[in-house]
Image (cartoon, rainbow, N blue to C red):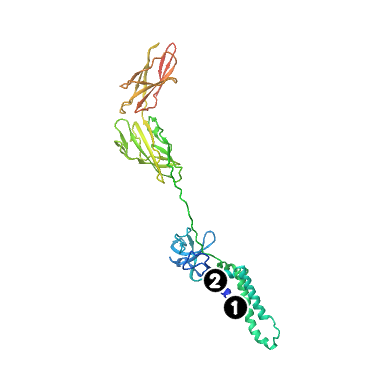
Amino acid sequence: MLWLGGAVGVLCIASFLAGWLFSVTPLVFASGSMSPAYETGALGIAHEVPAADIEVGDVVSVVNAEGNRVTHRVVQAAPAGDTVALTLQGDTNSTPDAETYYVSAADRVSFGVPFAGYALSAASSPFGLLVMVLLVLASLFLGFGRREGDAPRAIGNRVRVLVPAGLASVVALGGVVGVTGGAPWAFTSAVWTDVSTATATISTPVVDTTPPALSNPLPANAASGATWAAIDCASAVDQICVTATDTGGSGVNAVAVKLVRTNGADQCWNGTAFVPGTACPAQPMTLVAGNQYRTSGLTSAVMVQGAYQATFSATDVAGNSATPLVTTFGVIPAPVITVCNGSNGNNPFNLTWTWPTGVGAPDSFKLYYGNAQAPTTLPDVTSPYTGTSVNLNGPSGTFRIVAVIDGVESPMSNGANYTSGGGKTCAIQPT
């Protein structure tokens, strides 16, 4: 019993000295992630080595971000500044660890002893501690307790036995205290209870079946402008914009627009210029701000005066397609009223207006008067575009003319003010 206690104490002290002097770390494998090389309950002996000496295939023990020790096999090692980035994987795990370990040194497992970890775990448990203390007490009793009939002559031989036995018992007691964390140098005892862990994460994919939505085209549907500036979108000068919003969760993947000039011979935009026909593919749009997308490459040189149709499309990452958004707008000049005359009484007032050359003839002109009367379509579209107003014999108001091309109205012309009363005059406003 004395020599057994002494042997246990010597082993405990030797383990401590090995860890302290030679950076040797005993490891108890508490899971089967490294089977069959190291089964559950095996005791692994690890030695600290520089990270530069670690190679693919080595089994190393590191501490993860949560403070737990992980002992797995190296599947990738890459330099990362002053450290080495290690990718580890348990032999029974189907995927590498989610965490990448950046180390300057690590404990490399040299060999393992099957089932020895169970013994060490039992020795460091409360029950194991009790057994060890009882062993020490029994050793001291056997060595120093007097028995009836002991002769004085036996004292000399007993001393020769008791001295090493007592020292061995003290060594055993010190080893037990060290293992259980009671001594000042017990920080090394943490290696006796460190574990090797494997983590598996199961996630359920979210299926996106909701298509993105298109809205807020710029220029707006049925909009018209006398100059290029009238079709600018808010965040991109000289371009066309649309808002694409995804609510299904996968995100917008692509937005495009097919742009066709519809007045006269049909033409479509191929990303660089307008070419004859309508077979051009939709051109991709670029994200500019928030959920707004814009065209690229449009200039005032290619967006000449005329009527246009824009067909916007979009898809999300899951492959869902938005309902196409179709808008029409015009880049159309405004007529200019130059003459307004008439006679007193019920005689009609005659208006004369001009229309820019080189633009092409509108389909028709409309006359707006005051705020209460509906617009009147004027049949005269021949140069100099002279039309006849409605008969007036009452309230004052303002004449205004618009041109109509493919159903798109131009901006309104300048006004011609009609004043009723004794004089019944008509005055041209400046453009």
- Against 96, is 410 above or below? above
Q: Residue at x 55, y 69 (%)?
A: 118
Quarter the C terminus occupies: top left
Residue 125 vs residue 388, the one in the foreground: 125
Q: Which residue is mark 2?
A: 19
Q: Between tags 2 and 1, which lies in front?
A: 1
Q: In this rendering, would 63 be left or right of 327? A: right
- Against 30, is 250 above or below? above
Residue found at the far bottom of this picture: 153
Number of labels in the image equals: 2
- The image quadrant of residue 389 is top left
Query: How far is mark 2 from mark 1, CA to CA?
Result: 23 Å
Q: The residue under label 2 is which amino acid type?
A: Gly
Q: Position of residue 225 (x, y in %)?
A: 39, 30
Q: Which residue is mark 1?
A: 4
- Which circle marks residue 323 in the picture? none
Can residue 141 be spotted in the picture? yes
- Against 67, is 382 above or below? above
For mark 2, does the 10 Å Cα neighbourhood hold few (<14), some (14 to 19), or many (20 or more) residues? some
Callout 2: helix, strand or loop?
helix
